[in-house]
Image (tube, rainbow, N blue to C red):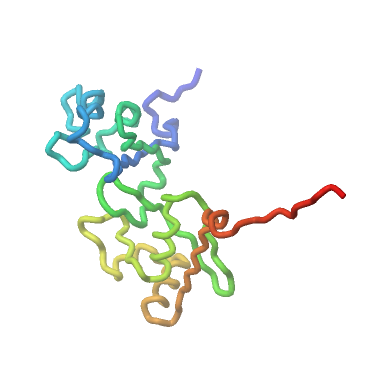
Amino acid sequence: MSSRSRNDKSTAPTDKLTRIAIVSNDKCKPKRCRQECKKSCPVVRMGKLCIEVSPADKIAFISEELCIGCGICSKKCPFEAISIINLPSNLEKDTTHRYSANSFKLHRLPIPRPGEVLGLVGTNGIGKSTALKILAGKQKPNLGRFEDPPDWTEILTYFRGSELQNFFTKILEDDLKAIIKPQYVDQIPKAVKVRFPFFSKS
């Protein structure tokens, strides 16, 4: 029998989850639903303001601190406007950019290196364009603080000791220029018509 108690911190799991609650501005329509997300939320039923929404609101607000990640609100929403994403807790401190509450969150950044081409491939909405704009100096990363964005001094301090610190310093001092070349491979079938040769029997 182990002599360690259940409350021993050394036995605690290291993969604790944190979560992102995303509410689509385009899909969320409080005036056209019965606020099923709020009514079905077990945390709200316990008397806590995990989901705040009324017919007069433009969009629902979900508290990521109170959310337990059950996903019931996502299943009950008639417009499929809610996504609850569970993430490892080690990403909680690695937020590079976020536009607003209950919106897309970018974690970390790819690292460009001299003499190499950096390519990002993936589905829509995963942060490729945002990451490239930040690396090109066209968008300042707010480190997740969309209400109180940091200045470049604080941003460089955040990346201190990494390759990105030197990269951003050179971008800001105009010692380096990043060039972006978007390639919309999903549009190729629409732009190119493939013609097959016609074979006739002799």
- Residue in the picture at 29% in, 54% down: 99
Who is closer to the viewer here, 111 or 22?
22
- Residue in the picture at 40% in, 23% down: 5
Who is closer to the viewer here, 39 or 107?
39
Is residue 138 depicted above or below 99 in this figure? below
Q: Quarter-wise, where is residue 60 in the image?
A: top left
- Residue in the picture at 36% in, 57% down: 96
Q: Residue furthest top?
A: 1
Who is closer to the viewer here, 10 or 166?
166
Q: In the image, is 199 to the left or to the right of 137?
A: right
Residue 143 at x, y percent in the picture = 32, 57
Is residue 107 depicted above or below 36 in this figure? below
- Residue in the picture at 56% in, 57% down: 188
Is residue 176 depicted above or below 90 in this figure? below
Q: In the image, is 182 to the left or to the right of 57?
A: right
Residue 114 at x, y percent in the picture = 55, 74
Q: Residue furthest front?
A: 202
